[in-house]
Image: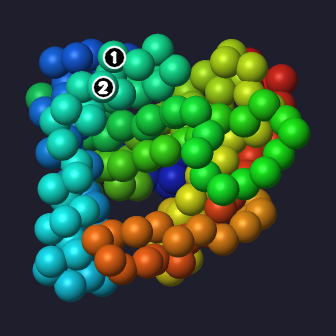
Amino acid sequence: MAGTGGVCMNAAYRAAEPADAPALKELFAESFVETFGHLYRPADLQEFLDSNTLAKWQANLADPEVAIRVAEADGELAGFVELAPKKLPYDTAAPAIELRRLYLRSNAHGRGIADALMRWALKEAALRGAQEVVLSVYVDNHRARRFYQRYGFEAVGRYDFMVGSHADEDLILRHIVMQAHA
């Protein structure tokens, strides 16, 4: 697929390793606060960030049902994508996997990294036997929604994404996995 129109950042891609847990935790928190922090009361944001523990990242990295791929550029983690068993409230008879997270540092936006991570995620989903990939995206995150639409994701439901006691209106999006991705 075509890139985002930006110059492809010189990035290296690899499977995440246990030693990446602190960097993943930090990148997730940094990116989340930068993108969404202004939406929440400080107490709700802090409660959400406090739940982003190193132990959770370590458990995800040790779980064979979770796949995390990282992009490194300029000596730091530039982004990552995480696939995991489906937990979103979306009923389907097809084997499905959840794209739980796709986050980039702000300096990695528009440089082809998200596209490379998404192509890997769709291929990995097919290799894991998924026929559908589902995710949730904040209804007002128009940049992300346009990105997912380019990959054929379509809205199939609504989801309350909790940040502390604040419920964000998220859309549940679905992508039908084609053999071409395998």
Q: Is residue 46 visible?
A: yes
Q: CA distance from mark 2 to mark 1?
A: 5 Å
Indicate left or right for 80 with 161 as reference: left
Q: Amino acid at mark 2?
A: Ala
Element under disc 1? helix
Element under disc 2? helix
Q: Where residue 122 appears, x then y in whole percent?
A: 65, 32
Residue 62's disc number: 1
Q: Where residue 139 appears, x then y in whole percent?
A: 55, 77
Q: Amino acid at mark 1?
A: Ala
Q: For the N terminus, which image quadrant?
A: top right
Asked where in the image residue 112 lies, by quadrant, the reply is top left
Q: How many marks?
A: 2
117 or 169, which lies in front?
A: 169
Q: Residue at label 2?
A: 59
Asked where in the image residue 14 lies, by quadrant, the reply is top left
Q: Measuring 65% from the left and 27% from the top, which residue is drawn there?
A: 125
Looking at the image, residue 1 lies above or below residue 147:
above
Q: Is residue 149 visible?
A: no
